[in-house]
Amino acid sequence: MIWRDLTDPRVVADGIDPEAGLKEPVFENLEIPEALGPVTLVVDDHKIKRYAFTQDDHHPWHLHDSPFGGRVAHAGLLSNDLVQLFTTRYAASRTVGLHTEEQLWFDSPALLGDEVTLSGTYTQSYTRRGQDYVVMEAGATGPDGRSILRHRGVEILRTRPGDVAGRGSTGDGGSGRVGGTADPTLPVAHIGTDSVVPGAALPAMAFTITQEQASVFSRCGEYVRNVHSDLAVARDGGLRIPIVQGQQQCGLVTAMLTRFFGASFLTGGWLRVKFVAPVEVFEPLEVGGVVTGVTPTGDGGADIAAEVWVRRADGRLSTVGWTSAGVPAGATGAEPELPATPAHR
């Protein structure tokens, strides 16, 4: 039976250590290029519902039905599996790094029951401001060979998170700045209406990631211990409490963008984010954005660009980024509410 995760945690019952024989995750052990994976996993009911719990995202496309014919995985469902592909070569529980940048291309939705193959490569490594960085490029393909999701990520391979998190930014620079504001005189943007104009705010969403959610997202079910799931590990890393994984914040952004762009985001959306400040578990967050460009296309649709962000309760931005998707004529966003059922009334 193909398992739903990168590793099969059931093997520990037979005395097998899933991390035995893997490399110490330090800069000196990198091989560039270095193949990661491949791994085949199944997008089953449990995987979808577990992600819905960790992200507090119970959209009907994932739990009931979608425009693609049946249930589909959340846009960000496989993104953390891609980020974590390095743990097929390196010991996950000995990793104390920081994800600094993420870029995703959404090519097609993963369908319920799909057996998906993940593979990646460490393509580049470098040192900047005393920190050792590594770049990964990876992708997820469906059972029919179609591309589902492509990923390019940058990570500090090993550091003391409490020290780096205290800086003005955990990133390594880059183009452009995200202000985190929209024009308050404009109505909120909704696809399919005249409200989608530069300066208009995207419909915002509020979240609070609890310790249970962060722990499950960060692979406690595979017996992985890290600064996101374990208080002792977080304290050893100079943190006062576990922090929310950058990729989990990225998933909050993709939830908002699925609702804003609708089906178009799952079949041609693009997102690039930088993680610029830490988020502790239990910290209230607001995910927002602003339209920055609307370019009409020949078919009557438009290519829409936006800035996006995650804002902490103290007003500081923790994640900033840029996104775009082509929206055909007549398209609308995804319905944000679940149908009225006894479980959700």
Image: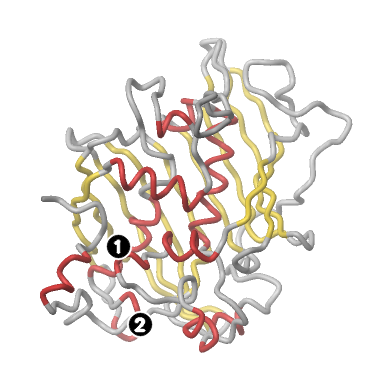
Which residue is label 2 attached to? 94
Left or right: 38 in relation to 327 = left
Question: Tag 1, which secondary structure?
Answer: helix
In the figure, 330 relative to 175: above or below?
above
In the figure, 36 relative to 16: above or below?
above
Q: Position of residue 109 (x, y in %)?
A: 35, 33
Q: Residue at x 79, y 45 (%)?
A: 181
Left or right: 130 in relation to 118 = right
Report the amino acid beneath label 2: Arg
Which residue is label 1 attached to? 85
Q: Residue at x 55, y 48 (%)?
A: 252
Q: Residue at x 65, y 45 (%)?
A: 308
Looking at the image, is mark 1 or mark 2 nearer the viewer? Answer: 2
Q: Position of residue 204 (x, y in %)?
A: 69, 40
In the figure, 154 relative to 192: above or below?
below
Mark closer to the chain start, 1 or 2: 1
Q: Residue at x 41, y 55 (%)?
A: 152
Report the amino acid beneath label 1: Leu
Q: Position of residue 260 (x, y in %)?
A: 60, 30
Question: Tag 2, which secondary structure?
Answer: helix
Between 112 and 102, the one lying in front of the other is: 112
Between 1 and 312, the one lying in front of the other is: 1
